[in-house]
Image (spheres, grey):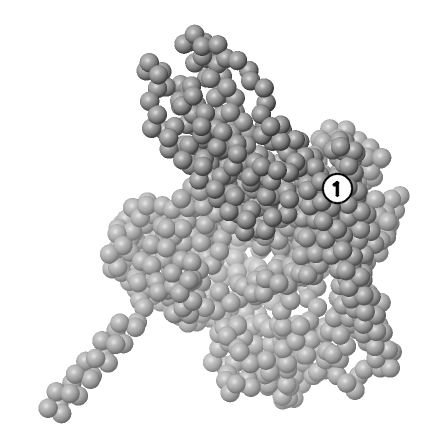
């Protein structure tokens, strides 16, 4: 039973080093280095487990550990296609991000199940070989990892709520850039609905250590998105409507021979031009203001999220 | 040495030409190889295939069996059994024999006609018989002559009845006074007919290849370049046109039959209905005189015309010759665009009519009909309407992408349709925009002419419980086609960017079968409405299931994840609805009219035909009177044009008026309005 314990400890240490580097503002290069080290450690553990022999021709414990290490490596490498039917995931998902998150969730579920299997086989093996398991006290590392997990549970819960609205706004902006009135209106309504769901969800997420920073930052962003979806987007729709009106008037105006055009025709044409130009100015001003505000609020959210993990994830090796 | 070089050059040139020539068998071989790869239900090139192509070809060239004899038909059928292997081996025995035999028999038919038409005609000679009594092919010369005699008599009767249409009170005896004129008209008409058959020889290849594709399914076709361009033009709402339509008169002249308001022709003030077209010259130097062209030739000329400016040489009705410059321009085309109105009555309802699923096929950035529907919805919402009617009657389909986008407007998100392709692979097409534009009560109106993309929309909205489907069962086409060049140098994914050799032509192939999110197909079944309305149209309905070689699709196994809405109160609405007395009466008249017209079409007696026509007129008059006097529950207000457009282009008011008049007499829409009032009542 001690055969795998060295690997377990090494994985746990590397996992802690990785979590620490993510939480305490290390450079992206250093974070990636820690991640690569962790993946290598898991890979080594898997190879060792694979070649291990069973005990008294019983390989169930060894097999469960091997599978666990294998799945851990797959999840870390995000190679979800090896354990999840990605076609089914795509079928159930609205877009690539949703598919990625669903695949990650399904893979994590498989990993958790594999972890439970290891525990069951561990106890089963001990019983079959008359070994008494003494539940040890948590090490310092165990305690740090538990705290870190709790911090990131809160982080992930808020992040998912934030990200859904953030992504939905991106779709709305994409629709605006394509002048697609149908997509604009659909995504606008979807954004309002997403915010409504998000606000409700935020009220159910327990604050970690009474720290409301991430929730507050998310609510500020929601207020901006709500204003944008309710009022701001109307400038874009108005601009598209005025442009279309102008094109319709232009089409019939230009089809007429110059000598047949009346002063009333010219007035209508000029009126349509003026309306369109006014709408252009309004939408440009609105977009500029919105872009600034959005950038400020998202930077703020990212800052608050970083400060949150830095505040709460334990330091030290 | 010089002679040797010259000979070599000549030989090379000859082989060069031979290699470039693409024959009918080359095309047939390539076409069937292509269809075998991509068709959703490819077929074996066996004797049944040959027989099917033969039957289609005979039906195309000789639908009334007036050209071929029984012996010819037997010979062709025998030869057709090996047509499949002939195509595979690139030999052309069948097609060569068909073409030759047709030419010989056509000459005999023409002579038969010419000898009969000059003889005295007893228009009651075959009074005891019906036109459709004749089955099969003529077994001998006597039968052949009799068939032609019947047809000529029928043609003369129809010509006389046309006169009756113009002068209502004529009796059979009066009509006989016009017999000589009618016979002459029939003679001239058949003269043009046989001339067209001769000049149609270049089209033999086209028709043969089309029959090959139709043996796979009724919606696959072969196109040459002209047909391909015409087909693609039909799918675009916004086309630049000169603004004229034309027709060939009985006397062989090509005359202007219509001028489109707002077009260059219209604005010139010099082009009028009835003007004869003498010649056309284009800015690129091409010139044609109409004498040298038939109507097909003129159509081809316009389709292939690159220049945006032409000069028309016209002769007016008082024989004044004039030359008019025309410029191609984008003109409002009333039959091709979405139309919107507010139906004001007990409740305000938004009405949107979509003629087809148009899109911009060349520039993906420009939006199509789904976007137009979205804009219409937003405009109608400003009028505070409480529900919407989306009218897809007579909408024969179009872009599948637009259909999916249109469904997306009314559902949050999810799969809309499942597509099956040749190798059995299944894909689901999804709404790509989360959210919807409106959750207000929605009725979709369909009829037997609603097909393809219309059925995708109606079916999906029905499956999501998003819309109440009202009308008659739709056509039943749940297949999709696309057009691809047959040039073998063009690869399937067009990665080599090579411009195709147009001589090979194009295949419009049925590459996909479509299934609803219920995994069942509407192919040959149609979309069955939740609430059926009586059919009051005065023409018979056609359905996919009646077409030769219609594909069979049943169901598929595929996981489909859709969030379905709460069920609609269909049973309650059905219980609350009963057809108005007007629609009942119109439906009864429809049945009578169709029955009488069938008898009229079959009649070979002038006396009987006159009586039947008088009866049909009476029925049509009654039908028309009921329509004219019917009052709708709503007053329609057109939202088709803005005030600025109407001020600058007052001719557009005519279209507005036509639109609101149509809505005022739309009995089916009135029934749907009544249902919507009940729907809103329950919804609230």
A39 and B613: which is toward the camera: A39
Percent x, y of residue B538: 66, 49
Q: Which secondary structure lies at badge 1? A: helix
Residue at 49% from the left image edge and 21% from the top image edge: A117
Q: Based on the displayed image, in which of its 4 quarters is residue B363 positioned?
A: bottom right
Residue at 53% from the left image edge and 47% from the top image edge: A32
Residue at 68% from the left image edge and 42% from the top image edge: A310
Percent x, y of residue A255: 73, 78
Determine if residue B305 is in view.
Answer: yes
Q: Based on the displayed image, in which of its 4 quarters is residue A1 positioned?
A: top left
Count of numbered labels shown in the rendering? 1
Determine if residue B666 is in view.
Answer: no
B321 and B619: which is toward the camera: B321
Percent x, y of residue B600: 59, 50
Chain at tag 1: A
Position of B553 relative to A128 (above/below): below
Position of B297 relative to B84 (above/below): below
Q: Report the side of B645 relative to B184 (left or right).
A: right
Name the residue furthest right.
B346
Residue at 60% from the left image edge and 43% from the top image edge: A22
Residue marked by disc 1: A214
């Amino acid at each position: 039973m001690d055969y795998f314990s060295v690997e377990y400890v090494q994985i746990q240490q590397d996992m802690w080093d990785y979590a620490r580097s993510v939480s305490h503002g290390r450079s992206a290069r250093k974070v990636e280095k820690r991640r690569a080290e962790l993946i290598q450690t898991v890979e080594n553990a898997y190879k060792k487990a694979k070649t291990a022999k069973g005990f008294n021709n019983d390989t169930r414990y060894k097999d469960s550990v091997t599978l666990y290490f294998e799945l851990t490596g797959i999840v870390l490498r995000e190679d979800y296609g090896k354990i999840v039917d990605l076609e089914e995931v795509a079928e159930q998902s609205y877009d690539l991000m949703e598919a990625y998150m669903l695949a990650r969730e399904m893979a994590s579920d498989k990993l958790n199940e594999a972890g439970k299997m290891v525990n069951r086989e561990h106890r089963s093996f001990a019983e079959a070989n008359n070994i008494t398991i003494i539940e040890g006290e948590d090490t310092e590392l165990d305690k740090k990892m538990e705290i870190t997990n709790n911090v990131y549970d809160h982080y992930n819960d808020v992040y998912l709520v934030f990200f859904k609205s953030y992504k939905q706004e991106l779709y709305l902006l994409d629709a605006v850039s394509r002048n697609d009135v149908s997509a604009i209106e659909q995504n606008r309504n979807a954004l309002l609905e997403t915010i409504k769901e998000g606000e409700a969800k935020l009220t159910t997420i327990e604050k970690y250590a009474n720290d409301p920073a991430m929730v507050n930052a998310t609510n500020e962003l929601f207020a901006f998105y709500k204003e944008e979806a309710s009022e701001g987007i109307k400038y874009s729709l108005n601009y598209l409507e005025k442009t279309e009106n102008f094109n319709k008037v232009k089409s019939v105006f230009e089809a007429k021979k110059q000598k047949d055009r009346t002063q009333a025709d010219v007035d209508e044409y000029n009126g349509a031009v003026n309306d369109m130009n006014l709408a252009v100015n309004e939408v440009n001003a609105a977009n500029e203001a919105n872009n600034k505000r959005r950038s400020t609020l998202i930077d703020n959210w990212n800052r608050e999220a970083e400060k949150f993990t830095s505040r709460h994830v334990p330091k030290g090796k | 040495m010089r002679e040797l070089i010259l000979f070599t050059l000549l030989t090379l040139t000859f082989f060069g030409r031979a290699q470039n020539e693409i024959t009918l068998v080359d095309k047939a071989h390539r076409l069937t190889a292509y269809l075998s790869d991509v068709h959703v239900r490819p077929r074996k090139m066996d004797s049944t295939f040959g027989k099917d192509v033969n039957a289609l070809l005979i039906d195309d060239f000789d639908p009334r069996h007036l050209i071929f004899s029984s012996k010819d038909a037997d010979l062709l059928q025998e030869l057709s059994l090996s047509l499949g292997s002939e195509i595979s081996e690139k030999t052309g025995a069948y097609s060569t024999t068909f073409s030759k035999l047709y030419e010989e028999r056509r000459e005999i038919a023409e002579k038969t006609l010419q000898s009969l038409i000059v003889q005295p005609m007893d228009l009651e000679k075959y009074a005891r018989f019906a036109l459709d009594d004749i089955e099969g092919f003529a077994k001998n010369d006597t039968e052949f002559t009799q068939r032609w005699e019947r047809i000529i008599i029928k043609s003369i009767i129809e010509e006389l009845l046309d006169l009756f249409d113009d002068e209502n009170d004529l009796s059979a005896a009066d009509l006989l006074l016009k017999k000589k004129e009618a016979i002459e008209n029939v003679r001239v008409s058949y003269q043009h007919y046989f001339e067209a058959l001769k000049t149609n020889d270049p089209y033999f290849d086209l028709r043969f290849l089309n029959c090959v594709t139709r043996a796979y399914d009724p919606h696959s076709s072969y196109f040459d370049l002209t047909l391909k361009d015409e087909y693609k033009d039909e799918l675009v709402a916004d086309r630049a046109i000169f603004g004229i339509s034309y027709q060939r008169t009985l006397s062989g002249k090509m005359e202007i039959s219509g001028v489109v308001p707002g077009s260059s022709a219209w604005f010139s003030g010099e082009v009028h209905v009835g003007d004869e077209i003498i010649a056309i010259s284009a800015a690129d130097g091409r010139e044609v005189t109409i004498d040298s062209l038939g109507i097909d030739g003129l159509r081809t000329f316009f389709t292939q015309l690159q220049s945006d400016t032409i000069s028309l040489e016209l002769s007016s009705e008082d024989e004044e010759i004039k030359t008019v410059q025309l410029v191609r321009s984008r003109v409002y085309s009333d039959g091709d665009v979405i139309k919107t109105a507010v139906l004001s009555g007990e409740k305000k309802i938004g009405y949107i009519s979509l003629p087809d699923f148009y899109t911009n096929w060349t520039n993906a950035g420009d939006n199509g009909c789904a976007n137009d529907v979205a804009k219409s919805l937003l405009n109608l919402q400003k009028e505070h309407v409480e529900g919407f009617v989306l009218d897809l009657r007579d909408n024969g389909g179009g872009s599948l992408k637009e259909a999916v986008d249109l469904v997306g407007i009314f559902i949050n998100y999810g799969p809309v349709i499942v597509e099956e392709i040749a190798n059995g692979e299944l894909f689901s097409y999804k709404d790509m925009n989360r959210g919807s534009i409106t959750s207000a009560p929605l009725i979709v109106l369909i009829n037997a002419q609603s097909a393809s993309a219309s059925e995708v929309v109606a079916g999906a909205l029905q499956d999501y419980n998003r819309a109440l489907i009202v009308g008659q069962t739709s056509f039943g086409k749940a297949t999709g086609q696309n057009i691809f060049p047959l040039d073998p140098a063009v690869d399937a994914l067009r990665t080599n960017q090579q411009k195709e050799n147009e001589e090979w032509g194009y295949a419009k192939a049925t590459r996909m079968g479509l299934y609803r999110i219920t995994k069942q197909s509407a192919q040959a079944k149609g979309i069955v409405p939740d609430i059926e309305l009586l059919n009051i149209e005065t023409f018979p309905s056609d359905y996919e299931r009646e077409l030769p070689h219609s594909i069979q699709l049943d169901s598929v196994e595929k996981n489909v994840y859709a969030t379905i809405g709460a069920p609609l109160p269909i049973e309650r609405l059905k219980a609350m609805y009963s057809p108005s007395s007007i629609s009942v009466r119109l439906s009864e008249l429809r049945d009578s009219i169709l029955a009488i017209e069938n008898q009229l079409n079959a009649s070979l007696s002038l006396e009987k035909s006159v009586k039947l026509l008088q009866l049909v007129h009476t029925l049509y008059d009654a039908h028309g009177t009921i329509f004219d006097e019917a009052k709708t529950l709503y007053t329609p207000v057109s939202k088709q044009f803005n005030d600025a457009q109407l001020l600058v282009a007052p001719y557009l008011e005519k279209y507005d008026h036509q639109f609101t008049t149509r809505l005022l007499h739309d009995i089916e829409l009135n029934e749907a309005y009544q249902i919507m009032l009940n729907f809103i009542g329950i919804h609230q």
